[in-house]
Image (tube, helix red, strand yellow):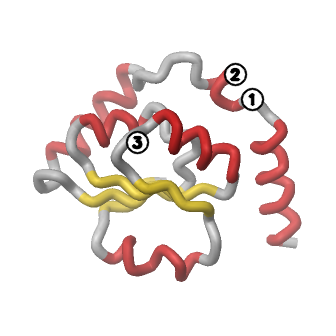
Amino acid sequence: MKQDMRRIVREGYEKGDYPGIFRRNSAPNEIEKRFLDRLLSLCPDRPAILDLGCGTGVPVDKYLVARAANVVGVDISPKHIALANDSVGHLQFRPRQKRSDHHEIGRRALRLS
């Protein structure tokens, strides 16, 4: 059942136009910006951040990278990983595999989801 849900979600993201429908603007809105600025104010310089479910990397990861965060993004959708790699520089995006694949990174990083 869990595998079926993952497949359905992944297929939906692969077929859909998430950035075109939901993210026409690559900048975070005021609420997102306030949250991200507060989050960064609580972190050391150049924080390591693991973003689980990073999607296209916009606007969150793009904003964090522009402020010197070291971001690793993980997502179930290969299409979103490709879009993230094209739109956000200086970070790593990875397809979601097993939870244990990202355990070592997550132990040393702030985790977003």
Q: Is residue 67 left or right of residue 45?
A: right
Label whose residue precedes the other's in the sequence (3 or 2): 2
Instruction: Tell me what residue is drawn at x 61 percent, y 61 percent.
Output: 95
Instruction: Tell me what residue is drawn at x 38 percent, y 71 percent.
Output: 106
Q: Is residue 76 left or right of residue 43?
A: right
- How many discs mark residues in the rendered view? 3
Q: Which mark is residue 64?
A: none
What SS does tag 1 mark?
Answer: loop
Depicted 51 relative to depicted 20: above or below: below
Instruction: Tell me what residue is drawn at x 64 percent, y 72 percent.
Output: 97
Type of the residue with mark 3:
Asp
Q: Is residue 81 left or right of residue 5?
A: left
What SS does tag 2 mark?
Answer: helix
Quadrant where the image shows the N terminus? bottom right
Residue 81 percent across, percent down from the top left: 60, 49
Residue 85 percent across, percent down from the top left: 51, 44
Residue 26 percent across, percent down from the top left: 47, 23
Type of the residue with mark 1:
Asp
What SS does tag 3 mark?
Answer: helix
Q: Which residue is mark 1?
A: 17
Depicted 87 relative to depicted 101: above or below: above
Residue 14 percent across, percent down from the top left: 78, 44
Label whose residue precedes the other's in the sequence (1 or 3): 1
Structural crowding at the residue carrying mark 3, measured as other residues with C-alpha within 10 Å and reported as few (<14), some (14–19) or many (≥20): many
Q: Quadrant of residue 109?
A: bottom left
- Pointers 2 and 1 in contact (CB under 8 A)? yes
**Distance from the alpha carbon under mark 3 to that under mark 2:** 19 Å
Q: Which residue is mark 2?
A: 21
Q: Which mark is residue 61?
A: 3
